[in-house]
Amino acid sequence: MLALSRKKGEALVINNNIEVTVLEIKGDQVKLGISAPKEVPIYRKEVYVQIQEANKAATEVSGLDALKGLF
């Protein structure tokens, strides 16, 4: 993991097309602004984990079991 220090108004660039800017700092909370192409999905980590778990659960149902449910 790369750890960087940034002040309010400062930014970092990822892969030439994603920019993360520190918008505000209040106590232990930091507000970030993210500029990225529309095709780049951006999720909070807890939402991303939920999506991954749902996708994993969906793939665990075998094809035959799914077909049996149709008839």
Image (spheres, rainbow, N blue to C red):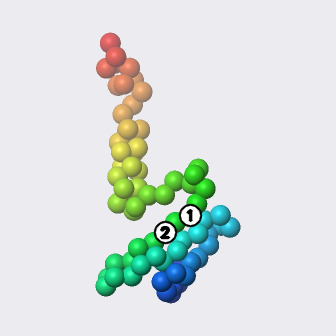
Q: Amino acid at mark 1?
A: Ser
Position of residue 70 measured from the top left corner of the image (x, y, whole percent): 34, 16
Please tell me which residue is depicted at 36% across the width and 34% down the height of the picture.
61
> Residue reaching furthest right?
16
Label 2: element kind? strand
Position of residue 12 measured from the top left corner of the image (x, y, whole percent): 58, 76
In the picture of the structure, the residue carrying the numbered disc 2 is 33
Give the quadrant of residue 58. top left
Give the quadrant of residue 56. top left
Please tell me which residue is depicted at 61% across the width and 56% down the height of the picture.
37
59 lies left or right of 16:
left
Considering the image in quadrants, where does the C terminus appear?
top left
Q: Amino acid at mark 2?
A: Gly
Q: Is residue 65 above or below residue 48?
A: above
Check if mark 2's residue and mark 1's residue have beta carbons within 8 Å: yes
Residue 46 visible at all: yes
Position of residue 24 measured from the top left corner of the image (x, y, whole percent): 42, 78
For this rendering, which residue is in front, 47 or 49? 47
For this rendering, which residue is in front, 16 or 8? 8
18 lies left or right of 63:
right
Q: Is residue 18 above or below residue 31?
A: above
Density class for disc 1 (Cα within 10 Å; few <14, some 14-19, many ≥20) is few
For this rendering, which residue is in front, 56 or 37? 37
In the picture of the structure, the residue carrying the numbered disc 1 is 35
Cα separation between marks 2 and 1 = 7 Å
Please tell me which residue is depicted at 65% across the width and 64% down the height of the picture.
17
Density class for disc 2 (Cα within 10 Å; few <14, some 14-19, many ≥20) is few
> Residue reaching furthest top?
71
Label 1: element kind? strand
Residue 3 visible at all: no
